[in-house]
Amino acid sequence: MTETSALDARRDQLPNAADGTARPAVDATPPWPIEVVDGVAVTTMTGTPANCQNEAFYAALHATLDRLDDEHRDRPVVLTGEGRSFSAGLDVRYVGELFRDGDHDALLAWKDRYFATNLRLFALDRPLVAAVNGHAYAGGLITALCADLRIGARGPARFALNEVPIGIPMPRTYLELLASAIGWPTASRLSLLGTELDVEAAHRIGVLDEVCDPAALVSRAIAEAARLAGGSLPAFRFTKRAVRAPVLGRMHEAAAGADRAFVDVVRSPESRRAIERLLATLDARATGTTCSR
Ligand SMILES: C/C=C/C(=O)SCCNC(=O)CCNC(=O)[C@H](O)C(C)(C)COP(=O)(O)OP(=O)(O)OC[C@H]1O[C@@H](n2cnc3c(N)ncnc32)[C@H](O)[C@@H]1OP(=O)(O)O
């Protein structure tokens, strides 16, 4: 697919702005930087605070994957983040407003747009290694768990599937994805309890496959990505499709069925209050006022 046709296809898939959400046009959004090292395409999430996920993030992700497909079709991929966070998950300022003010159809449209980003990463038909440079919360940890392998940097990073404590239900769509990466018992426990993990604990329970010094992180991820593709890329592709197919089937089924009720839960007064508490915590940090999570 040429660059233009990929962008046209992507633009056609985007819902129009009638749902009331502002979105940058995909062709106006630059992809994240891509660097080729030892045959591996390394891309770095950047452009939003703590690499949190909003419409600009989704558009950059699609633009990056379009470019990876067009220009680096057969290269394994390393995904990392800029700064202290791999990704802080959904942009809670953005979704907080959307959940409060958006109508039912706007929320469903957003849910599908968000699903499309994780789906594209999870179904990437070649090795994807996450070089987890820092914190990964909620949707940010889901992003890391889309990868075939996760390598973490030793240090102060924390990880959690903390959707429930902040008032956002964990859809079955993502439980299927999480369970395929870390198993149902771990996915269930982390999702229900919202437990915060340090790097060692994340490694112990398989959220991270490996831990290394921060200075070696990206080179370790590159070496692993090259190794995964090094035997036979066609064999890897074939097997990854086979591994993903049943999971993707269940994810699509959940997204079109039970998970539509997600919209009602995030609009409940209890969820709104919990999201407001997280927003107050972030705002207090920004202004230097102390506030516990
Ligand atoms: C289904 C999926 C659901 C979800 O994904 S819900 C999202 C759940 N996410 C969270 O609970 C994470 C909230 N963020 C944090 O706890 C912390 O941040 C971190 C531990 C990730 C990073 O801490 P530190 O390195 O000290 O950075 P900082 O100063 O807290 O953040 C840097 C800037 O990033 C903004 N930010 C951080 N996380 C989010 C977010 N999730 N949504 C929107 N903005 C976020 C902050 O406010 C700040 O911004 P400014 O520099 O303007 O003060």
Image (cartoon, grey):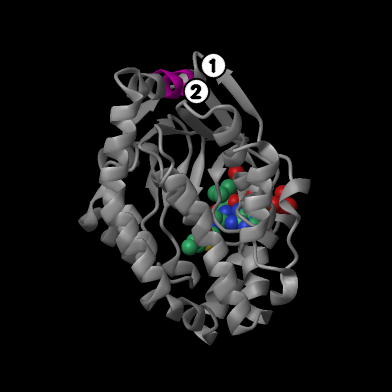
- Name the residue at 75% across, 47% down: 27
Q: Label 1 vs label 2: CA separation? A: 10 Å
- The relative height of residue 158 versus residue 132 in the rendered view (above or below) is below
| Quadrant into which the N terminus falls | top right
- In the image, farthest residue toward the right: 28
- Name the residue at 75% across, 56% down: 24
Query: 218 or 126, which is in the foreground?
Result: 126
Q: Majority secondary structure of the magenta segment?
A: helix
Q: Are circles 1 and 2 on residues that touch, CB within 8 Å? A: yes
Residue type pointed to by label 1: Val
Whole-percent x, y for residue 105 in the image: 60, 80
Query: Which label lies toward us, 1 or 2?
Result: 1
- Name the residue at 32% across, 66% down: 192
Whole-percent x, y for residue 76 in the image: 45, 27
According to the picture, the residue beneath numbered tag 1 turns out to be 37
Instruction: Specify whether 217 is left or right of 250.
Output: right
Under circle 1, the secondary element is strand
Instruction: Specify whether 5 is left or right of 189.
Output: right
- Name the residue at 63% across, 44% down: 6
Whole-percent x, y for residue 175 in the image: 33, 61
